[in-house]
């Protein structure tokens, strides 16, 4: 059964093409509700993300939704899915922000995610977890 670690609508602020590899864009985004900062590498040919677009982003430990006796997959509701490993967590201070934040780093076979947010909202994340990231245009 899927345990949700992150479920937010993110606003794409900036994209950088070819930062790491050809056909890969590095996305900078902010969540609408809980003040998360997202830096994410995506395969831009498979799933283009442009500035000022909104996307729903979900991070889960499983793709299976257990419902009324029938198992369903989260992939049915999303357009882009990656599977990776959480390899690092660190405390961080943002410029102009006195509050300490937690940064989570996940590698999806070379494509990277850095998620920065309030420590109270990051308590489920643990190093060496295997997680799924799912995206769909909102």
Image: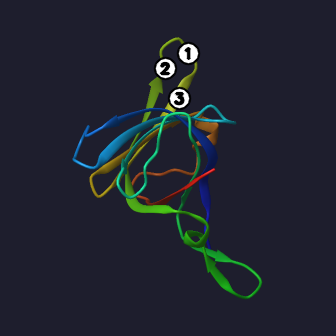
Identify the mark at residue 94; answer none if there is no mark. Answer: 2
Q: How many residues crowd mark 1 within 10 Å: few (<14), some (14–19), many (20+)?
A: few
Q: Are marks 1 and 2 in contact (CB under 8 Å)?
A: yes
Tell me the distance, in whole angstroms, between the alpha carbons under discs 3 and 2: 8 Å
| Residue 130 sits above or below residue 68 on the image | above
Circle 3 is placed at which residue position? 101
CA separation in Å, label 1 and label 3? 9 Å
Residue at the farthest left position: 21
Q: Are marks 1 and 3 in contact (CB under 8 Å)?
A: yes
Q: Depth check: 115 or 22 in front?
A: 22
- Picture quarter containing residue 68? bottom right
In the image, residue 112 sits, relative to residue 90, either above or below, namely below
* Label 2 element class: loop
Residue at 49% across / 20% down in the picture?
A: 94
Residue corresponding to mark 1: 97
Of 134 and 121, nearer the camera is: 134
């Amino acid at each position: 059964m899927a345990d949700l670690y992150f479920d937010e609508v993110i606003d794409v602020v900036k994209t950088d093409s070819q930062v790491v590899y050809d056909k890969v864009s590095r996305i900078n985004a902010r969540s609408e509700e809980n003040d998360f900062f997202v830096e994410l590498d995506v395969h831009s040919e498979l799933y283009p993300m442009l500035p000022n677009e909104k996307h729903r982003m979900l991070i889960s430990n499983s793709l299976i939704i257990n419902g009324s006796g029938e198992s369903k997959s989260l992939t049915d509701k999303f357009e882009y899915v990656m599977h990776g490993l959480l390899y690092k967590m660190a405390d961080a201070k943002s410029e102009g922000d006195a509050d300490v934040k937690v940064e989570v780093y996940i590698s999806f076979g070379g494509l990277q995610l850095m998620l920065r947010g309030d420590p109270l909202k990051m308590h489920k994340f643990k190093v060496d977890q295997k997680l799924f990231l799912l995206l769909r245009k909102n």
